[in-house]
Structures are given as C-alpha cells and as structure tokens.
Amino acid sequence: IMSEALKAVMDYLFDVVGYERLESRHDPRNPNSGAVMRKCGMIKEGTLRQRMMNKGKFVDVDLYAILRRDYMKK
C-alpha cells in the first residue's frame, strides 16, 4: 500500500505541480522505508550523518531522490 501511495504522490508532483526532483529521507534503522523508495524508482544518494534529532540524539538519515526524466521513463 505504501508504494502505491508514494507513486500517486510522485505522479501528482511531477505531472501536476511540475517538480523536476523529489527527495525523501528515512532512518537507516528502518530498511523497509528504503525498500518502498527503491520500489518506486528512487535512488539512494547517500547517508546524511547526524542529520536529524531523534529522542535527544542526533541520528543518520539515508537520502533518496528521483528526477522527472527518470520517473517518466517508467
């Protein structure tokens, strides 16, 4: 269900709003979130170290992105 929801949001942002690039982040301790992003064609661009505060501690986040031109090829 999550990948279908993400694809619907991506369709809207690329087709209606006109975005050229979409980014998403997730906590690397939750690999299922990354799997959803990859299933929708997003590519991991790297890990942002200590990017976010969670429960009083800085944590890493994985950054994924997709460009309009890559999404439209699907």
Image (spheres, rainbow, N blue to C red):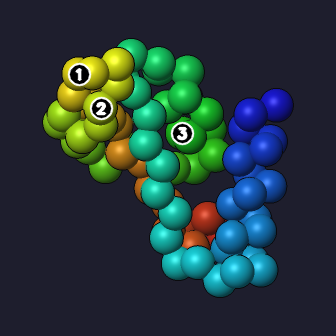
Describe residue 73's horizontal placement relative to residue 5 as left or right. Answer: left
- Total count of labels: 3
Amino acid identity at mark 3: Arg
Q: Is residue 17 visible?
A: yes
Residue 71 or residue 25, whichever sits in front = 25
**Residue 38: assigned label:** 3
Relative height, residue 38 to residue 64 (above, below): above
Q: Circle 1 sits on which residue?
A: 57
Relative height, residue 35 to residue 63 (above, below): above
Q: Secondary structure at mark 1?
A: strand
Name the residue located 31 percent from the left edge and 49 percent from the top edge.
Answer: 45
Name the residue located 61 percent from the left edge and 64 percent from the top edge.
Answer: 71
Residue 71 or residue 9, whichever sits in front = 9
Relative height, residue 53 to residue 19 (above, below): above
Name the residue located 29 percent from the left edge and 32 percent from the top edge.
Answer: 53
Residue 47 occupies which quadrant of the picture? Answer: top left
Residue 49 occupies which quadrant of the picture? Answer: top left
Check whether the beta carbons of the residues at disc 2 and disc 1 lie within 8 A of each other: yes
Question: In the current view of this chain or complex, which residue is farthest to the left?
Answer: 49
